[in-house]
Amino acid sequence: MKAKPIINAHMHLLSNYDIPVGFPNKAISKIANTKVGYALLKGILHNANPFKKSDSLDKLLTFVKASRIGSEKELFEDVAKYYPSDTCFVALTMNMHHMGAGRCKRTYYEGLKALDELRDVYPRILPFYMADCRDENMNSFFDHFLLQKAWTGVKAYPPLGTFPQDERYNYVYEKCQELGIPIMAHCTYGSPVHFKGKKKELKKLLGSQYDKKLSKKDNCSKFTNPLNWAIVAKRYPDLKICLAHAGGSEQWKEWLSRPGDKDNLLNEIIEIMREYPNIYTDISFTANKDFAVDVLYTLLTEPKFKFIHNRILFGSDWYMNLTETTEAEWSIGLKRKLGVKLFNKIARENPYKYLNL
Ligand SMILES: [Zn+2]
């Protein structure tokens, strides 16, 4: 029997037209977005450490270079090279129009349409539509892309400023549950991608949960808290939700030194998965360095984690991962470190169940 194609269940084809001008940092993005500025930045970064070829600044540069690519086609063809030719890719869109970081170069709809057209050329792209309940078109775009165009799933990015249990999401959740459409939710604390607007606005978004002693970034982690998703899972028991990145590599590192720590985000996610059988997790961005592969290996082989063995998904987080590593480290390196059998489990078995394919 021929093996099923690999599914990379977490990656981005986000063009720079869909990233607000003020993100990640007004000054840097202004410089990086001009030809001269980019060349200058490249010069500075390259000279920062002339003796080391792959230093972190170099990686930052590779990332800046990828994020300057205007076309999702180029981004897709770039990532596809690292995988067998029948590999499928979950392409997660981002709605960054409501995060208080300024305007994007095109509307959200224009970005979605561009991805939809690319999917017509490459049907192995599995697009996810990002729902943000502050967007007045959320439900109508959902109808258009999920129901009419048969896109694959829904992306959620709570630290941009909304709670997953917000009732404005009910229509989306109800439909997703009814039709078996999966949700992919970013789940690490302290994400650099978070609400960037005024403190006053953030206070309004967070309500009683706002803590004036915390930074904006840490306040935004309250939106991310996986317990919010437990509320959603309780309301919609058949809804498939993936808590992406499994808490992030810092939490994984701590997990190795203090395995039983209840406050560890990976442990919190595992506990929620114990309670709710339709909650999944993915390893994108998180599970690449050796120590993290050790954690992943443990999660996939220890009998005490048997209940999550079928719910861990392979994803690389292309091109965000370029700040830390290379795509080859994910497509080839991870397979070697984990072994073909376990790699196939997370890349050729588990995602099929999550995606209802
Ligand atoms: Zn991602």
Image (spheres, rainbow, N blue to C red):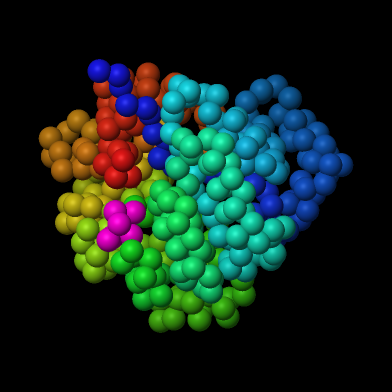
- Residue 175 quadrant: bottom left
Taking the image as shown, residue 260 lies to the left or right of residue 29, namely left
Q: Give the residue at the far right of this rendering.
A: 36
**Front one among 16 and 51:** 16
Q: Residue at x 29, y 54 (%)?
A: 180
Q: Residue at x 55, y 31 (%)?
A: 79
Position of residue 74 measured from the top left corner of the image (x, y, whole percent):
65, 35
Task: Look at the magenta stretch and give its main secondary structure.
Answer: helix
Taking the image as shown, residue 211 lies to the left or right of residue 118, namely left
Q: Is residue 98 magenta?
A: no
Taking the image as shown, residue 29 lies to the left or right of residue 256, namely right
Q: Which residues are magenta?
A: 176-181
Residue 295 visible within the image = no
Q: Residue at x 46, y 69 (%)?
A: 139
Residue 246 visible within the image = yes
Q: Relative to 203, say whether 309 is above or below.
A: above
Q: Relative to 287, say whether 93 is above or below.
A: below
In the rendered picture of this protein, how many numbered marks are placed on residues? 0
